[in-house]
Structure formats: C-alpha cells, structure tokens
Image (cartoon, rainbow, N blue to C red):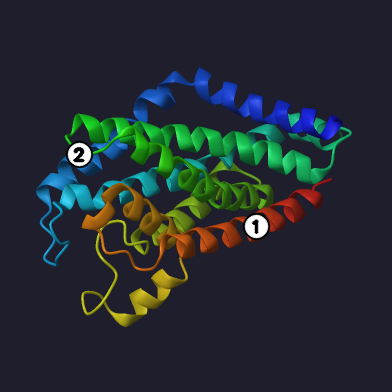
Amino acid sequence: MTEIRGIYTLWLREIKRYLRDRTRIVSSFFQPLLWLVIFGSGMRFSGTVGSLTYQEYIFPGIIGQTLLFTSMFMGISVIWDREFGFLKEILVAPISRFSIFLGKMLGDSTDAVIQGAIVFVLGLLLGIRLDLVMFLEALPVMVLITFGLVSIGLTAASFMESLESYGVIQSFINLPLFFLSGALFPIRGDLVPSWIQTASALNPLTYGVDALRTIILGDAWQSLQPLYYDILIIGCFDLVMMAIGTLAFSRRK
C-alpha cells in the first residue's frame, strides 16, 4: 500500500505541475500547428503517399513528434528537483527506487499524452478526418510510446548536472529519433537510401508512428508491418528503458 501511495503521489505531483503551467499548455498548440499548417500545406512531397494529402500523411507523425519532444522535455523535472533538494527527499522516502521512477514516469507520460491529444483537436480544426473511436484506439498506443520516451528523458537527466547539459543531450536524441521515424516522409522502397532504412528500423519511434498511422489513416495507409508487431516492439522498448531508468535512479545517493 505504501508503494502504491508513493507512486500515486508522485504521479499527481507531475500532473499538478503541468496543469499549473498554463504558458506551456497554450504554447503546446503552436508547434504542431506550425508543422501541420505551414509544412503540411506548403510542402509537396515528391514520392507517393497514395490517396492521402501530405497534411493527412504527416498528421500521425506530428502526434509522434509531440509525444517525443514533450516526453524528453519532462526529464528536466529531475534536474529541477535535484536543484531544490526535492529529489533527495524523494530518494530517502520509504518506497523503492522502482516506485519512485514509476511514479515520475507515469506522471510525465500523462502530461505528454495530454499534449498529444491536443494535436487531435488541431486536426479536427484543420479538417482532417477523425472520430472518437479512432482517438480511443490511438490513446493506448500513445501511452505506450510515451513510457519508453519518458524513460529515456528521466534516465539521461539523472546523469546530468545542469539544464544546459541536458538541453544539448535532449536535442542530440530528439532530432535523429524524429527525422528517422518516417514522420515526414515514407521510409520504404527506393525513396530513401538503404542506410536510412536501416537506421529507421532501429528507431523505436518508427514503430510508434507506423502504429498511429495504421489506426488513424486506416485503409488509406499501407502499414510497414502488422499493428501487433509495432505494439510488440514498442512494449519491449518500454520494458528495457524502464529497467535502465530504475537502475539509473538506484545509483543516486
């Protein structure tokens, strides 16, 4: 019971911290809006995306981008907690390091999913074909995606001593994961070099974006692999990163 209460308390703290930051909530509308309106409308990809408009094609990718950038940004909370001494108080609490990591990971994942849901609202406003059933089917996949990505952010932040250092690492991780995920262009056939296809196959976000496209675009999207395969890869990635994150928190004194 103590472990569950500790996890819940840490989860609730992260949620309250996010909801009280109204500037971040409002600003979360603008980055995906710029990608969807300016890049999605102005760019004309030379390859084929079937019957889809380019804006429809990148829409699931922009959801993946939002989940990625938000999840990685949440790692900053570890550095702030260390600066103000709150992390030390958490680490001496009578709960396991796994529960500490899990509570923060669940809270940050919830924040990231909320921002991902905001992109769905933008999609509706832009006329992209969406419905409630589609959103409810995509929601568990979004949650799974954020578990692994948030774990990366928390793990990296646990080794950083300053916000500046984490900012550099954050960009170093974010950009390759995003651009090699197929979010902006198809990664298949002769459209891209073979080395990009290989790097993309090793990128966990590739499978997250593909799963979101399969759900959101339906028959209009020819998936790279079955949906269950995408979910299996994402799930395995989550477990590995959660294990690494717990070990990283266990080494904190």
Residue 238 lies in quadrant: bottom right
The disc at residue 5 is none
* Residue drawn where x is 28% and y is 52% of the image: 218
Whether label 2 touches label 1, CB < 8 Å: no
In the displayed structure, 169 sits above or below 101; it is: below
What residue is shown with label 2? 128
- Please identify the residue farthest to the right as the structure is shown: 94
Closer-to-camera residue (7/42): 7
* Residue drawn where x is 57% and y is 37% of the image: 108
What residue is shown with label 1? 239
Residue 25 spot, x, y in % from top left: 41, 25
Residue 138 lies in quadrant: top left
Crowding around mark 2 (Cα neighbors within 10 Å: few <14, some 14 to 19, many 20+) is: some
Closer-to-camera residue (76/57): 57
Residue 128 spot, x, y in % from top left: 20, 39
Picture quarter with the C terminus: top right
- Identity, as a three-letter code, of the amino acid under mark 2: Ile
Q: How much space separates mark 2 and mark 1, taking CA atoms?
A: 34 Å
Q: Tag count in the figure?
A: 2
Picture quarter with the N terminus: top right
